[in-house]
Image (cartoon, rainbow, N blue to C red):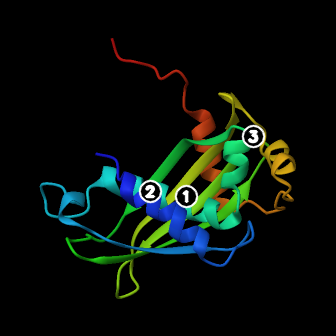
Amino acid sequence: MYPYVRSFNAFVFSKLKEKISLMEMHSSNYICWPWDIDMWGELNNGRALSLFDLGRYGFLSRLGLMKYFFREKISNAVAGVSVRYRHRIRPFSRIQMRTRIVYSDDTFLYFEQLMLMSDGRCAVQSLCRLAITQRGKLLPFPKACEKMGIIPPSLECPIWVKKWIEAESERPWPPELAM
């Protein structure tokens, strides 16, 4: 089941923290609970994606953007993600998640998110492409910023992000299905 209680906590408790700017990093802490693990006794890869959702919720909440989401009927949708798993996260392990924007273009926001273990090792890293939508239609990122009264960041695209974007543009859509 989706972690609704954790989602609520991410919104509420992040809102109580000091506000951040679009280019700052949001840090949040989690515990890997027994219901987060898979049959191998480690953090389930699907749950890792759900926890990354929570990190982005906290980030957006600390930016103060949630009011616009409700007032303007603006939403966000994951439009692609790439995840690296490098170390096992076991039950009751404490995880620090770091969330930041690494790039934006006319259409998407690109988030880098890390799950750090208590000894500082990076266990999981993700690159998430997020689309902003309004009433079910894609809202170009600069237009979304204008509606929310923020200045879109001017970022140079890191080479590894650029190569991921290029690789994604080469993938066929709709997918070529084997018959």
Which residue, given by chain and number where applicable, does mark 1 sit on? Answer: 57
Residue 116 rendering spot, x and y as whole percentages: 41, 77
Residue 151 rendering spot, x and y as whole percentages: 87, 59
Farthest residue in the bottom direction? Answer: 119
Q: Nearer the viewer, residue 119 or 94?
A: 94
| Residue 66 vertical placement versus 14 (above, below) | above
Kind of element beneath mark 2: helix
The answer to whether the residues at label 3 and label 2 have Cβ atoms under 8 Å apart is no
Amino acid type for the residue under numbered disc 2: Ser
Figure quadrant of residue 32: bottom left
Figure quadrant of residue 15: bottom right
Residue under the point 60% across and 34% down: 170
Q: Which of marks 1 and 3 is nearer the N terminus?
A: 1
The answer to whether the residues at label 2 and label 1 have Cβ atoms under 8 Å apart is yes
Which residue, given by chain and number where applicable, does mark 3 sit on? Answer: 72
Kind of element beneath mark 1: helix
As measured in the structure, the alpha-carbon distance from the residue carrying label 2 to the one carrying label 1 is: 7 Å
Amino acid type for the residue under numbered disc 1: Tyr
